[in-house]
Image (tube, rainbow, N blue to C red):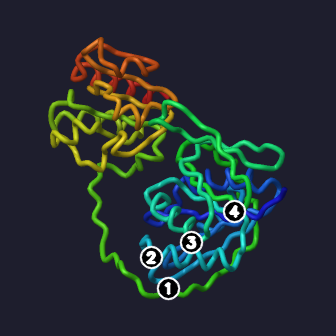
């Protein structure tokens, strides 16, 4: 049965996050031939609405307000509820990001709706969406279906392929005016403590260091390889606890959950807490001098050796490939 599905796009530093396009692809399936409406929030919205159309949205609405310049729970919740009231969709999809994880349960509560979180796949069964969700720290998967009522889901970045971009695809773009009041939180400034500009949750290639990297200086060789591969740099909790890098880079059960195309684990033993954050990566390469390290049990490719010898050699080899191409 055709449905009208609303997609909340996510803008960071003036750039649409890729998960916004993945959410559109999921919404197209859920809509089952119905209408997909993209919504974008910010102080000023420009060509981003057109980009949402290029990736498959049938129509777009933009909500411009000074209090939406940066994400706050109160402001976005008020704005989104007003958009839902105006559009009256039968479903809502957003990214399973820090923003989505904060906002989605609050909206679900206000709508008295069920919420399927952290979706990695969507299938259609007789007009109803079936969602695949990882459980037990990624060791198993369950399939969920919303039997009746509002369909609400958040999608994990890097799992649902976006539709092919078509710059000739177009649709109506409208403005929605919202009233935001009684804010409990106002953000004056955001200070980021991250290395590099690639978002870990959306990176296609990630190089992570563990306690085996031994120091802050040890991470420099990972940075060099990341620069060559256009990768993001991550870390195990052990490396963060040891002070080798900031906790913003932590990957694992108590850090970020990532699913890149390529994950290179350097000097990481493979504790269960870390595996919970990266075991669903498409290809895993492990570099460790201990041949019995648990990380090799989940790795597609393993290199037993001193990371301080292996990684620089790997970096030089990748430079040669880049020059040759």
The residue tagged 3 is 110
- Label 1–label 3 contact, CB within 8 A: no
Q: Quadrant of residue 6?
A: bottom right
Labels 1 and 3: the sequence-earlier one: 3
> Is 166 situated left or right of 188 in this image?
right
- Label 1–label 2 contact, CB within 8 A: yes
In this rendering, the label closer to the viewer, 4 or 2: 4
Q: Residue at x 30, y 50 (%)?
A: 248
> Is 141 situated left or right of 297 in this image?
right
How far apart marks 1 and 2 lie (CA) works out to 8 Å
The residue tagged 4 is 150
Labels 4 and 2: the sequence-earlier one: 2
The residue tagged 1 is 180
Q: Give whichever of 211, 140 is nearer the camera.
A: 140
Q: Give whichever of 88, 95 is nearer the camera.
A: 88
Percent across and percent down for residue 36 are 73, 62
> Against 39, is 245 above or below?
above
> Against 70, is 137 above or below?
above
Circle 3 packing at 10 Å, graded few (<14), some (14-19), many (20+), is few
User: Disc 1 on helix, strand or loop?
Assistant: loop
């Amino acid at each position: 049965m055709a449905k009208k599905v609303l997609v909340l796009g996510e803008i960071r530093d003036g750039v649409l996050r890729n998960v916004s396009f993945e959410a559109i692809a999921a919404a197209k399936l859920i809509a089952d031939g119905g209408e997909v409406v993209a919504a974008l929030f910010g102080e000023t919205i420009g060509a981003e609405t057109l980009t949402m159309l290029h990736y498959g949205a049938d129509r777009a609405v933009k909500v411009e307000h000074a209090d939406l310049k940066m994400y706050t729970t109160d402001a976005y919740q008020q704005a989104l509820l007003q958009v839902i009231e105006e559009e009256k969709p039968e479903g809502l999809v957003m990214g399973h990001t820090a923003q989505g994880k904060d906002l989605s349960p609050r909206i679900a509560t206000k709508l008295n709706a069920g919420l399927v979180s952290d979706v990695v796949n969507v299938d259609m069964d007789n007009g109803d969406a079936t969602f695949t969700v990882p459980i037990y720290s990624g060791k198993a998967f369950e399939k969920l279906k919303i039997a009746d009522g509002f369909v609400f889901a958040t999608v994990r970045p890097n799992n649902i392929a976006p539709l092919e971009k078509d710059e000739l695809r177009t649709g109506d773009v409208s403005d929605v005016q919202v009233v935001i009041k009684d804010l409990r939180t106002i953000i004056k400034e955001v200070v980021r403590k991250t290395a590099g500009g690639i978002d870990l949750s959306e990176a296609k290639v990630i190089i992570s260091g563990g306690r085996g990297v031994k120091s802050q200086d040890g991470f420099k060789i990972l940075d060099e390889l990341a620069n060559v591969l256009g990768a993001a740099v991550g870390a195990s909790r052990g490396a963060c606890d040891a002070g080798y890098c900031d906790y913003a880079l932590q990957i694992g059960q108590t850090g970020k959950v990532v699913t890149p195309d390529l994950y290179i684990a350097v000097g990481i033993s493979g504790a269960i807490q870390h595996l919970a954050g990266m075991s669903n990566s498409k290809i895993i390469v492990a570099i460790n001098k201990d041949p019995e390290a648990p990380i090799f049990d989940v790795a597609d490719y393993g290199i037993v050796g001193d990371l301080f010898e292996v990684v620089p050699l790997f970096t030089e080899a990748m430079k040669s490939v880049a020059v040759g191409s």
